[in-house]
Amino acid sequence: MADTKYKINRLQTTNDIRPLVDKHWAELRTAKERGEKVAWASGPTFIIPYAMGVKCHFMAGYAAYCGGIGAADEVLKVAEMTGDLPETCSYHRLHMGMAEAVRKGISINPQAILPIPDIMISGRFCTEMSHYAEGLHRRLKVPVVAVELPIPYEKEDVPRLKKFVLGQYRDVLIPRLEEFTGKKFNYDNLSEIIKNLKEATMLRNQCWEFFKTKPSHWTLWDYGVSIAPVFYLMGKPGSTEYYKKLLKELQDRKEKGIPAMAPEGEKYRIYWDGWIPWAFLGKFMRKLTPRGALAICGRYPWEFFPHPERLDPENPLESFINCFFDEDNPRVFSNKAPKGSLEYISELIDEYSIDGLIMFSSKTCRMWNLSYLDIIDALDKRHGVPGVVIESDMIDSSMISDSQIDTRLEALLETIDGRRR
């Protein structure tokens, strides 16, 4: 089914991402040499040390970075060599491996090494985030501040949980960081961060609209790497400028009729559910592109600030938390699939003219991949849109199978073709 005539018209703006990301990690890597304190954080807690001028690493961001630069496998090998089970979360293992490499002087890619933190903030969306903090505390003796971020089961739970999480930020996290830094929390700085974040994410959502056109003017992978400025440059110059440049390039493409996939656009419009495969973006692009298949839509991109218009610099802390505990945010209910998922994905199928579904099931993150077969069955019956499950991982190459990808992708596209005929 492959047809070599299909190629990706690469965006120029996304070439700006690597220098921005490298600069962020270089500043963090050398922070202690300048006498600065360093924090590590999981979940949406990193904004608090950012507001206090503390250099901060973001757990998922580091994992995506290591996967993207091809450093993940060697760090994961160190984790396994020093006792971590390969079945556990690959993000967790990556941090354990990096910490052990630093602690024991094991040689790994220097770009994957970070300074050992002075404090860790465990914002727990999943069980592995508490294991990550506990494991690093036990090995490195670093103090931990824990914040529980429970996932609602029903929409009626959301207001109560917002209050609970806000109380933890105000009564636990902020006072602990004030004690850690020896200074009062800077609400003015937080307001400035929220102001810049709102502008950047609203521009980003304007870019998202270009997926609705047929053919699409960019790919889901372009969007995935374009998440980086939100986390790495939050409150700093560069994030808004990046999205302005990206938006202009997409507007130019629309005016000139330039599709994401040459020569005339995609043959199959694919919905992608689950994690972005950070270490394997090139692999999946090489699998999909020759077949004329383009991933253009999914739930993952809406995890972060799906309604940026609700961010309020006058109420920075409350509005930030509200964005993560939002009744309209599909991420809030994603691990209760198919509950809360079917109606939302149905809307996406219609709105983005989806031809087929790929459910990316991470072998080390089962919590977020529940009931995929039930979802596929229900949506197929409702819309006549077929789907497949591809089992893999975000960064661990030992859990990715080329033959499985090829077989299931061929089955999906043959089913689409058969129904079209």
Image (tube, rainbow, N blue to C red):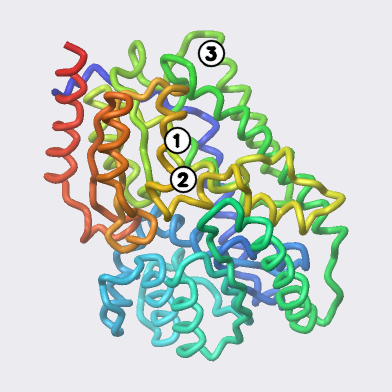
Q: Where is 372 relative to 144, above or below?
A: above
Label 1–label 2 contact, CB within 8 A: yes
Quarter of the image where the N terminus is located: top left
Q: Residue 294 bears which disc, if any?
A: none
Name the kind of residue labelled 1 in the image: Glu
Which residue is found at the position 43% from the left and 43% from the top? Answer: 341
Q: Of residues 240 and 41, which is closer to you in this image?
A: 41
Q: Distance between the residues labelled 3 and 1?
A: 30 Å
Q: Residue 340 bears which disc, if any?
A: 2
Q: Where is 154 relative to 270, above or below?
A: below
Where in the figure is residue 87, as x and y percent of width and height?
26, 70
Q: Distance between the residues labelled 1 and 2?
A: 7 Å
Which residue is found at the position 47% from the left and 21% from the top? Answer: 217
Q: How far apart are marks 3 and 2 (CA)?
A: 34 Å
Where in the figure is residue 22, as x and y percent of width and height?
54, 54
Name the kind of residue labelled 3 in the image: Lys
Where in the figure is residue 328, as x and y percent of width and height?
59, 42
Name the kind of residue labelled 2 in the image: Gly
Q: Residue 343 bears which disc, if any?
A: 1
Q: Where is 148 relative to 329, above or below?
A: below
Helix, strand or loop at label 2? It is loop
Which residue in the protein does label 3 denote?
A: 254
Which residue is found at the position 56% from the left and 39% from the top? Answer: 16
